[in-house]
Image (cartoon, helix red, strand yellow):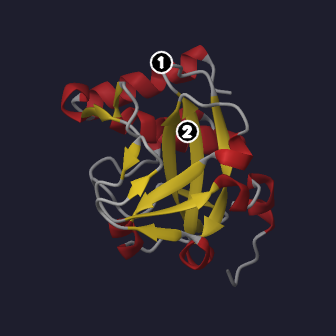
Amino acid sequence: MLDDAEIRDIGEYCNHYFNPEENKKFVNHLDTREDSNKVGIYGECAVGKYFYTPVMTTLLNRPVHVSDPGFDILINDKRWDIKCQVSNNVGKLKESYYMNLPASMLKKDPTGYIWVLKWKDRWDAYWIMGYLTKKEFEGKATLHHKGEKMGDRFTYTNETYDISASKLMPIKQLTELNSDN
């Protein structure tokens, strides 16, 4: 877990480089507004820390002058795009949660994606849900079209791919990827 000092460092970094009020928006259609840049950078730092990279090193290595270079973090010389989602449902995460990605993101060319789930309204609770290479994601994910409904409470606002968290590869296996993936 990220400690209080690391969470404070992330907040100071975001406040320095981004205008938090301009970036507040509904995150994952919950009834809360959070700074979208901070949520994303939080996920990057959580993954970095998992791979023994100090939070300040992750922050200093970010391409801050490029709004989105197509990846967020290098792990074993591979480019990974971190997708941090916010949820108020922390029970049965692997079985029931769906990780999503706007279809427009597939135009980028990272090695793959790592999903982090942050607990709503808390900066000290997160789960690294798992990863998939881009090729695996494209083969396993389901495309939903704008206006399509999921249950009674959710309507897709743009073309979005989603995948059950239970189909993600465990993060501990990421270090085992060989060079031809």
Residue drawn at x 55%, y 33% as measured from the top left: 118
| Most foreground residue, 32 or 171 | 32
Q: Residue visible at 37% across and 38% down? A: 29
Q: Nearer the viewer, residue 130 or 166?
A: 166
125 with respect to 107 (left or right): right
Q: Which residue carries the number 2 mark?
A: 45
Badge 1, how many Cα within 10 Å: few under 14, some, many 20+?
A: few
Q: From the image, which quarter does the C terminus lie in? A: bottom right
Q: Is residue 53 visible?
A: no
Closer-to-camera residue (126/1): 126
Q: Position of residue 26 (x, y in %)?
A: 32, 34
Q: Position of residue 145 (x, y in %)?
A: 34, 67
Q: Residues within 10 Å of mark 2 (few under 14, many from 20)?
A: many
Query: Dot 2 lies on which element?
Result: helix
Q: Position of residue 125 (x, y in %)?
A: 63, 25
Q: Of 129 and 69, which appears nearest the observer? A: 129
Please give the residue where the numbered disc 1 appears in the rendered image.
8
Residue under the point 36% across and 75% down: 107
Q: Is residue 68 above or below residue 11?
A: below
Q: Name above or below for residue 70 compared with residue 94.
A: below
97 on left or right of 59: right
Would residue 43 be visible to someone looking at this image? yes
Q: Image height check: is 9 above or below 104? A: above
- The quadrant of the image that shows the N terminus is top right
Amino acid at pointer 1:
Arg
Q: Please, what is the three-letter code of the amino acid marked with disc 2? A: Cys
- Residue visible at 55% across and 53% down? 99
* Among numbered discs 1 and 2, the one appearing first in the sequence: 1
